[in-house]
Amino acid sequence: MSVFQKITRRTVLRAGLAAGLIPALPLRADMKDTPEALAHDAYIWGYPLVMFGRYLDTFKAQGNPINQFVVQSALSTPATPGGGPNVDTIYGYTWLDLRGGPQVLQVPEVGERYYSIQLIDMYGDCFAYVGRRATGSKAGAYAIVGPDWKGMLPAGVKAVPAPTNDVMTFARTFVADEADMPAVRDIQGRYGFGDLADYPKATRLPIAKPEVQLPPILDLSSAGAGYFDELCARLAADPPRGDDIAHLKRFAAIGIVPGARPSADARLAPILAAAVPAADKEIKTVQYVSVINGWSVNFSMVSFPKDPLLRASSNKYGPGAHIPEEGLYFNADKGPDGQVLTGQKAYVLRFAKGETPPVDAFWSLTAYTPVMHLVENPIGRYAIKGGMPGLVRGPDGSLEIRIQHQQPAQGPANWLPVPDGPFRLVLRTYQPRAAVLDKTYKLPAIAIAG
């Protein structure tokens, strides 16, 4: 067998089709292609591309390096910026530019520890993972290959075809507590990137910072007709792939083509601007979640959503949503009485013996303020994690998590502190087992403490 693997655009597309990674996106046959309808559809279809373009611009404006991780060197706290930080994993974040050729990602042996490196294209599609679930825990080398590259890879380097030349890259590495941080720093310090010509040397090891500035939640509702100019500019930088091209062919009727400025057309500009508010509202209000015992969860995420509205909706609160096999998040902001969760009441989440979430990696329950910051509290605890030392179980083997503002009478062992006002809960399951994925397992409802 040759020690090289030949990679071309054709083999990349063929591999994606064979694996079901490049889907046929449905067109809307139920609506006439009026300029108004096309503008509406184009806003929704292009929403992730415009969002990710802004994320990329922000990343560069912050002075961050391309093709090199910036990694978090300290645990998250209530002061950590951005929405929804956790204390389960330490983050790494970068953007890849594959126009100059593949970037070779090298990862170390991690043992039983959970880690994942998530790769997301410019259309918001989570196209691949390197990590414990997807590629195993041993050391390895992975060439992230752009759609236009033709060449060969050395033996031992696995190809990861990327649909676009710009790729958002998130790393998450499990951390148990502060005492575990030195081991985590050592592992993530070896998540290296290098040009293919430099392999096997990883020429760009991570830059460590106390905080990693993750992409902000953006609001595009006021973008007006200029949104479509932005979309066209992004199309020129990162053209669509596969059957996504069929959508773009429709939108050409209203001047949406790579590099164009459709807002410069005086007849079209008012139509384009008028389409933005309604299409944006549709993205923000559509629901793809299931509600199970008061917990909302999205089972609909796939690597390449066929529905443009699902793809847009999945990215409306920022990037990085996992496919279910990697991680499912259960969210709650209301109690059993239908009222908003508040620290003015005391709650309990009770797991019967053997009924904690079935996972192959870990689960955790985290409390957040209404704006998704961690909750300041006197014992410095922001989450309850499965397997956390010191948890106390009942005589029957059950586990009761006390969710309240003041320390419970039972003591702090199972206490998840919350603010004295409204709050939200997120229960994360990483590498959930089949019973979670097929909804056989039901997360218990939150109850008001007696």
Image: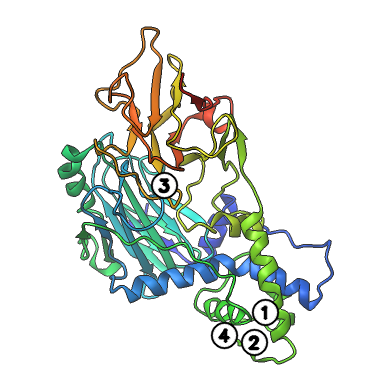
Residue 27, position as x, y percentages in the image: 75, 62
For the residues labelled 4 and 2, the Cα–Cα distance comes to: 12 Å
Q: Residue furthest front?
A: 344
Specify how the rendered protein is coloured: rainbow
Instruction: Give the distance between the C-alpha atoms of the residues marked 1 and 4, in whole angstroms.
Output: 19 Å
Distance between mark 3 and mark 1 Cα atoms: 35 Å
Q: Nearer the viewer, mark 3 or mark 4?
A: 3
What is the number of the mark on residue 273?
1
Label number found at residue 263: 2
Q: CA distance from mark 2 to mark 1?
A: 9 Å
Q: Can you identify the residue that label 3 sits on?
A: 369
Q: Which residue is mark 4?
A: 259
- Lower position in the chain sequence, tag 2 or tag 3: 2
Give, as a three-letter code, the residue at label 3. Answer: Thr
Where is 174 relative to 449, above or below?
A: below
Q: Position of residue 210 (x, y in %)?
A: 21, 57
Q: Mark 4, mark 2: which one is toward the viewer?
A: 2
Q: Position of residue 31 (x, y in %)?
A: 83, 65
Residues under labels 3 and 4: Cα distance?
42 Å
Image check: 51 left or right of 60?
right
Left or right: where 72 falls relative to 254: left
Q: Which of the 4 image quadrants contains residue 241?
A: bottom right
